[in-house]
Image: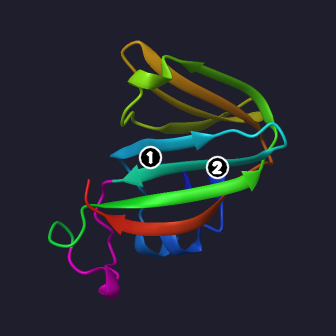
Amino acid sequence: MLNLDFFGNNFFLKKIYPEGIYNSIFIKDIMISLNGNSEFSFFIKQEPLFPVKKWGKWEEDFNALWVKTSSNVRFKGVLISNPDRLGFNKLDIYVEDFCQIFISQKENSHVNLSLFKNDRFIIQNVIPIFI
């Protein structure tokens, strides 16, 4: 399950997914800046419990949500292996000790981002798309 409390500005996603996001969460982009202003985006391929009328119908007009985030976060650690092979890797987020861990792996490739516990990626945009 994707814990939306790991993100700032999560009100809209909590409204359309009141029971949570349980599966089909995939990394799209990670952009890390040395000055701290970093971006992170992912896809959700779970139908919202409450539809958004202007988006149309699930599986007819869109089949995923593209969630774009950014923030001035402090990284405790970054580990990326074989980034060209990442593709649509499943995303897991959890808390360990005093940091949040964003991890995605597939075969010989993986991404592991460790953020300080109180830092958050802020949700900037949620876009319905077909993937």
Label 1 environment density (alpha carbons within 10 Å; few <14, some 14–19, many ≥20)? some
Question: Can residue 47 be spotted in the picture?
Answer: yes
Label 2 environment density (alpha carbons within 10 Å; few <14, some 14–19, many ≥20)? many
Q: Which residues are magenta?
A: 45-57
Snapshot quadrant of residue 5 = bottom right
Question: Can residue 98 be spotted in the picture?
Answer: no
CA distance separating discs 2 and 1: 21 Å
- Nearer to the camera, 118 or 127: 127
Indicate which disc residue 1 carries. 1
What kind of residue is marked 1?
Met
Q: Which residue is mark 2?
A: 39
Point 48% across, 68% down: residue? 126
Sooner in the amino-acid sequence: mark 2 or mark 1: 1
Point 54% across, 51% down: residue? 3
- Mark 1 lies on a secondary structure that is loop
Residue with the most extreme bottom position: 53
Q: Main secondary structure of the magenta part?
A: loop
Q: In the rendered view, how is the structure colored?
A: rainbow
What kind of residue is marked 2?
Glu
Q: Position of residue 117 (x, y in %)?
A: 78, 42
Q: Position of residue 57 (x, y in %)?
A: 20, 77
Residue 123 located left or right of residue 114: left
Residue with the most extreme left position: 60
Q: Position of residue 130 (x, y in %)?
A: 25, 60
Residue 15 located left or right of residue 87: right
On whether residue 52 falls in the magenta region, the answer is: yes
Number of numbered discs on residues: 2
Point 40% across, 52% down: residue? 43
In the figure, 67 relative to 27: above or below? below
- Nearer to the camera, 1 or 78: 78
On whether residue 51 falls in the magenta region, the answer is: yes
